[in-house]
Amino acid sequence: MAPRFSVLLPTHNRSDLLRLAILSVLAQTDGNFELLIVGDGCTDNSAEVIANFDDARIRWFDLPKAPYFGYANRNIALKHALGEYMAFVADDDLVFPDHLALLAATLEKSGAEWVYNRPLWVTTDGIVVPFASNLLNSDELDIFLTVRNHIPATCVLYRRSCLDKYGYWPEDVPSAADWRYWIRIIEGGHRTNLDYCPIPTSMHFNAIWKTTPDTQMGQVTTAREIAAKSSWWPATLKAPIAPGMPEQKVFYDLILSEGYVDQLRRDVMHVVERLAWMQLDETPGIYFRLRGETVQTRHELAEAFAVREREFAEAVTARERELAALRTRIAEMEAIQRDGCGIYRRLNPLLRRFRRG
């Protein structure tokens, strides 16, 4: 009997995190899936990590390195996929136990071909930033399709029929093949074949080359700065990361703890609502209170604001002095002009008599 889901998990020398990604997939509440792990020229002990799992649902494709991020190898595995739904899990991401079940339920309810869940971006210092991008809004969808990708591939589930209708991943691009493939599916469906699950079901972590918190996309960096300074950012979305400890291990243990995922989902809504309200009220006193920053931080910001006000007032005063001096000069020139006209009027009759004379 064919599995309900085919989960594509590509990897390249990430054996340190691969085990956690696999465990998060194997913990799905809907266990009717196959896990297609695609080794893209792995030279570490990834094969050994996979061999330690005694699970018939795992299929290991140990392939030579393909160009770029190994998109061609992903297509090789997809051509062996048997599931009705296609999922993707990055080797350094984690999925919640009901990830597959919730996304499939969303597709089945709407009849869509492609669905994604609310992204959760995790910074290297353990701050979880929820994203509030709803592609069912036409302007947000247009930005996604034409400007930039802000949906991690781990958030996506699509129907197997998309492979027949829209083809496979592009293999000749150096990066962002997932985004280009999503564009092809959505545009092929005239932008009406997608749906959105606002419940977060996965966590997206920094790529291996992004080693500091400020190397995320701009929106994540801004939210992280608010979280780092605020007193209200929920504990479920801010986990301390010990030196040398992968943030994935910290959050994997949290996901396994009773009640964590449910509380995280409630806290995500709290954060999204709080950030939205902050955008609506920029009155300095209320804005700082909404940010929940410490008294010291508020005093520092207030002092900086006062300094800017003084600088602005001094600049205005200097400009007013310049304008006053300019007005005085203009008045002097006008007086000279008036005097010159008076002299001309007095001399003009004499000049006419002199010419006649």
Image (cartoon, rainbow, N blue to C red):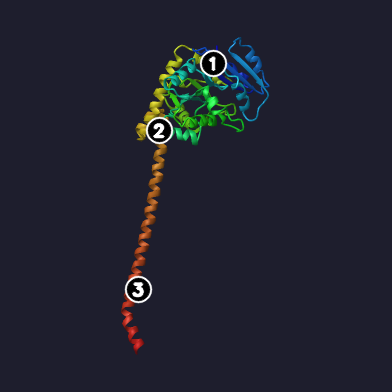
- The answer, for residue 125, to whether it is visible in the render is no
Say which amino acid is labelled 2.
Answer: His
Left or right, residue 333 beside residue 204: left
Mark 1 or 3: in front is 1
Q: Position of residue 294 (x, y in %)?
A: 41, 27
Q: Residue under circle 2?
A: 299
Q: How far apart are the alpha carbons under marks 1 and 3?
A: 94 Å
* Chain-order first, disc 1 or disc 3: 1
Q: Which mark is residue 25?
A: 1
Say which amino acid is labelled 1.
Answer: Val
Q: Quadrant of residue 333?
A: bottom left
Q: Residue under circle 3?
A: 340
* Chain-order first, disc 1 or disc 2: 1
Residue drawn at 40 percent across, 49 percent down:
315
Left or right, residue 240 beside residue 65: left
| Vertical placement of residue 38 versus 288, above or below | above
Towards the viewer: 16 or 350: 16
